[in-house]
Amino acid sequence: MFPEQIIDYLWFERELITIFEIALEKLLERQDNYISILPNIIGRVATKMGEKLAFKEAFLFLDVLNKVSLQYIQKSDVNDFNKSNEASIAMADIYYYALISILLGISKKMEQVDKQYLENLTAHIKWTENKYVFNLDIPTDMISCLEKLRKKILFEFEAEGKRITPQWYINQLLANETAVLIKKICESVTEKFESYLSNIEYMLTNNKFLIATQAIQRGLEICRKSDVHLAKIKDSYDSISQLRTVSDIPSPEIDWEAIEHKIDQTEEKLLICLSSSLLTLVSVKRDKTFPDYFGFAYLTLIQRCYDSLFKSNERLFVLLFPSLFFAGFKARERLIEEIQNLSIESQFTVITGPLLDIIELSGYTIIYSELEKKNYWQPVEVLWRQLFDDSPDPDALLQLLLGVIEANGGSLAISARDSLRSDWSMKLRQKFVQAGVLRDRYAERVYNGDEDIVHESPIIRAMGSEWDLVFDAKDVFVAIYLSTRPGFVLDRMNWQTKHFYQSLQREQQRGEGND
């Protein structure tokens, strides 16, 4: 019996990776100063691997980073900000940093790899020179393909005195091999991206929230940038696919939608992990020498909560909003301690910002629930009821909320998140247009004056005319929820909120009359 010989083409790389693993462990063990520059070095190496399309070697590199960083994190005790935790935060971040560097390198290379690139490559190959193919600056998978071709072409030279295989056939074989390589790269990148979630979940389970947030931040960065990088890779795949001339050779098909869906799923899991850490992050005293992890988590979740409304992702919204809701009120207490050196007006704007965020998002849940017949508002109402029930002074809480709404309704000051709220408002208008409730401003139809919105919901009808939205989410929240609380006084509200309340009353009466 002769056992099948399995050749390990990466034996040399595995030896190098083992040396790197030992060196990295020793650096971390003795807290060497080189740790501070290690991420930059690893990022450059990972980018170079990506540019060479050496994804197998790159993922060996990633596996070691994953193993060593997890071992280091397991030994560390990271619950607050101090200098001894810098290395732990760096090691939590280093895996995703290397992965995004690999993806960047691949993307840069794929801008060059197209139909013309492969045609030029095969047109200038010197098939009779022994080492020519091996000296080409291309991935090992493509070299293996050309090596097999070379043996057959050399046989043609011996038998016929010339090459018989046409150029287009050589191009197609190499194009197929390149397509296989692209498919492996895409599938491997998404798999490696998702696999690190277990480490993040370990960090959260063991109360290592700071380093978990750093890893999540880098993971979300990959999600933001993956669309651009995958688009470049897909353009390369589409270009080389033009070299397929005959269909008798099977060619790989890549399900790009499945890859994007898998990345979206991983992004949602990262957001859920971030949400679970929010209430702990808001309680950690901030050190200005470290990143503002709570600020990052809070702003990220605010935007993603609204995006889940806009994209009709009811499940994600319900998972993200509760922690954001309670963190918004805790953030107010935290901000009071941090802004003592600001002017009174600036202090008020900063302190009330988180409350205004929660109020507006709550208003939007009512609007989107009515507009799209979803159930966003019901779980949000439960949270508000719980908040008032647990409050030692519900009337004072109500007056605080009304004061925040009243002050921001009449203020000309511009807050840090006004641009974000403007974006929410524009997206809502877009939804109204898509639903056929609101006229497109650029429609050909001539404007003949105010016309009523036609919709079964009195809330939607009360929001403005057929041509524009007059009222916003704060007005809706006051009219639907706060007006039902004991101690509510309508006359205290600004003119816009009062006007919406009255418009809603008219629309509700009109609906009852029609019934």
Image (spheres, rainbow, N blue to C red):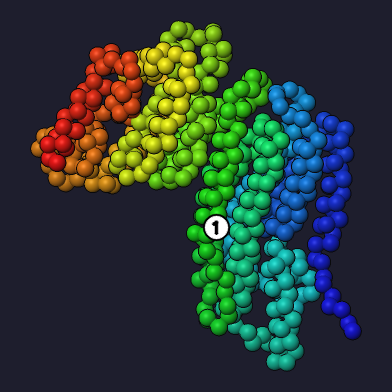
Q: Is residue 111 above or below residue 150?
A: above
Horizontal side of 492 relative to 453 (left or right) equals right
What type is the residue that disc 1 sits on?
A: Ile
Q: Residue furthest right?
A: 1
Q: Secondary structure at mark 1?
A: helix
Q: Position of residue 254 (x, y in %)?
A: 54, 65
Q: Residue at x 67, y 31 (%)?
A: 210
Does residue 43 appear in the picture of this structure? no
Q: Residue furthest bottom?
A: 159
Q: Residue at x 24, y 39 (%)?
A: 457
- The quarter of the picture where residue 44 lies is top right
Does residue 212 appear in the picture of this structure? yes
Q: How many C-alpha atoms fall within 10 Å of the one at disc 1: few (<14), some, or many (≥20)?
A: some
Q: Is residue 159 above or below residue 318?
A: below
> Disc 1 designates what residue?
259
Which quadrant of the figure contains the C terminus? top left
Q: Residue at x 36, y 34 (%)?
A: 364
Q: Residue furthest left?
A: 448
Q: Position of residue 160 (x, y in %)?
A: 70, 92
Q: Position of residue 362 (x, y in %)?
A: 39, 31
Nearer to me, 385 or 117: 385
Which quadrant of the figure contains the N terminus? bottom right
Nearer to me, 210 or 377: 377
Q: Residue at x 83, y 57 (%)?
A: 14
Horizontal side of 167 relative to 432 (left or right) equals right
Total marks shown come to 1
Q: Position of residue 398 (x, y in %)?
A: 38, 17
Nearer to me, 222 or 361: 361
